[in-house]
């Protein structure tokens, strides 16, 4: 498996400190899914997440780097990969850490 996808859906940029809610992307199957986070040097971090069909997909931000873009794949309970769009089973997600700086006057 490669560290990045040649064809992917860009899911956008999210705060690292929050659960990432993928609005518009619904689970197609009920059960344990395996989220595969693709890293350089052909390494993959996998995490099992349980979804219910037709519910919005969410990803714990702690599974991703705190700041940067990563490719992900979601293996469904039947062993097939989630289709982020027609014929595309890979997605790119960007995370960033937001800091608030208070100004004292």
Image: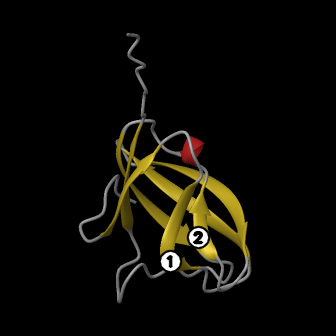
| Numbered label attached to residue 25 | 1
Instruction: Mark 2 or mark 1: name the one nearer the start of the chain.
Output: 1
Residue at 59% from the left image edge and 51% from the top image edge = 19
Q: Quadrant of residue 93?
A: bottom left
Disc assigned to residue 1: none
Which of these two is toward me, 58 or 70?
Answer: 58
Q: Going by the picture, which residue comes out furthest to the top?
A: 105
Residue that lies at the very extreme toward the bottom in this rendered image: 86
Say above or below: 19 vs 35: above
The image position of residue 70, as x and y in percent, is: 37, 50
Residue at 24 percent across and 66 percent down: it is 6
Q: Which colour scheme appears in the figure?
A: secondary structure
Q: Secondary structure beneath disc 2? A: strand
Horizontally, residue 84 falls left or right of residue 47, namely left
Residue at the spot 45% in from the left edge and 36% down from the top edge: 66
Residue behind mark 2: 57
* Label 1 Cα crowd, 10 Å radius (few <14 / some 14-19 / many 20+): some
State how far apart marks 2 and 1 are (Cα): 6 Å
Describe the element under mark 1 as helix, strand or loop.
strand
């Amino acid at each position: 498996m490669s560290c990045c996808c040649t064809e992917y859906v860009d899911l956008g940029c999210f705060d690292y400190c929050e659960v990432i809610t993928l609005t518009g992307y619904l689970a197609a199957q009920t059960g344990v899914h395996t989220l595969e986070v693709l890293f350089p040097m052909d390494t993959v971090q996998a995490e099992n997440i349980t979804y219910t069909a037709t519910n919005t997909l969410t990803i714990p931000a702690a599974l991703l780097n705190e700041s940067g873009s990563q490719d992900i794949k979601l293996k469904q309970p039947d062993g097939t990969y989630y289709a982020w769009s027609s014929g595309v089973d890979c997605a790119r997600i960007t995370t960033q850490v937001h800091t608030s700086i208070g100004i004292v006057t």
